[in-house]
Amino acid sequence: MKYFYDRKSDSLYLSLAERREYGNSMEAAPGVVLDFDDHGQLIGIDLERASRVIDVSDLELHEEPSGVDAETARLDGVTLRQKREQLNLSQLELARRLSVSPNTIARWERGELKIEHPGMLQLALGSLHKTAPREAPTAASRTYYPDTNARPLIERARSVRKTTVHPGRGSETIPTVPRDKHRTKAAAIDHGREIAQNTSVKRVAHDRDGRIRDSDSYGNERHPKERGTDSKHAKKK
Amino acid sequence: MRTTEYFERKIQDRGIDRMWCERTVENPIATEVQEDGRVRYWAYIPEAKHYLRVVTEADGALLNAFFDRTFERRRVK
């Protein structure tokens, strides 16, 4: 059963069988109209001045907004999928950005799961519109930079070169790739931590022999199961 | 004619042509003013073979519309 409440006109409609075609109506009591299909089956109840009949304050969370917000309220699985495809995001990527499980996205899109707060979802999707278009995710971006917005920052940092002037001996220009620019390991770790915090990724420090020395996570770190799913997906491709 | 969000939704759900509603308000065969000031209009719609009831706010904004079986029975009696 679904219902639609229009606060402005104080009208409430209870839909009992949405897919049946409307036939005609009967006024059962003043302001209470029953809708029937062509076979005489009850399909809906229309209440004028609903606030006089029931306590509509309980409906506030579920009422469908009017005007501009109506579009938001009608967001369903099909439109969610369309918007996701417009954003060039996979279900997995969208799930990560919205902090929901990929299964939730899949069930929303299939219409198996009701979108409880479509307005919030619409806002979230709107904010994704404002971000820079994503590049096709690479294995590296999936592994190290879950949020690809972080990648330009890191790549820019790598491309910057630092010129050091030696009095009397001229100057030399060295690339400021993080591992080359720091005089001490502690300084490199601090710099890495700063980048990781700013871009909400995981920081991993390696020893010279490649073994992991330590690590910190600053959000958006993906679950190992998700990484496993990705690698399988990549193999299929 | 001004309409409400509810009206727009209900005529769409019920498959009622907006022109039928306007025709009913302009040329009703019966009218009633409710206690709350809202006005009911009825007219026969040959295309649908039903009597249509249109409810408007006191200021004339279209509020609701449906094929009124109750009115048909009242007419027969």
Image (cartoon, helix red, strand yellow):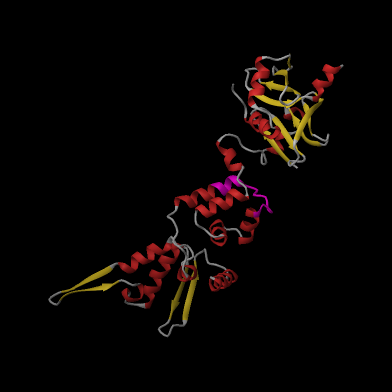
User: In terms of image quadrants, where is residue A94?
Assistant: bottom right
Task: Classify the position of the N terminus of chain A by image quarter.
Answer: top right
User: In terms of image quadrants, where is residue B40?
Assistant: top right
Front residue of B19/A128: it is B19
B48 left or right, relative to A220:
right
Is residue A121 within the magenta segment?
yes
In the figure, A110 relative to A180: above or below?
above
Is residue A103 within the magenta segment?
no
A70 left or right, relative to A183:
right
Q: Which residues are magenta?
A: A110-122
Q: Residue at x 55, y 67 (%)?
A: A222
User: In terms of image quadrants, where is residue A53?
Assistant: top right
User: Farthest front residue?
Assistant: B47
A132 left or right, relative to A59:
left
Q: Is residue A6 visible?
A: no
Q: Is residue B44 visible?
A: yes
Q: Position of residue B28 (x, y in %)?
A: 70, 15
Q: Position of residue A84 (x, y in %)?
A: 54, 54
User: Farthest bottom residue?
Assistant: A209
Q: Position of residue B70 (x, y in %)?
A: 81, 23
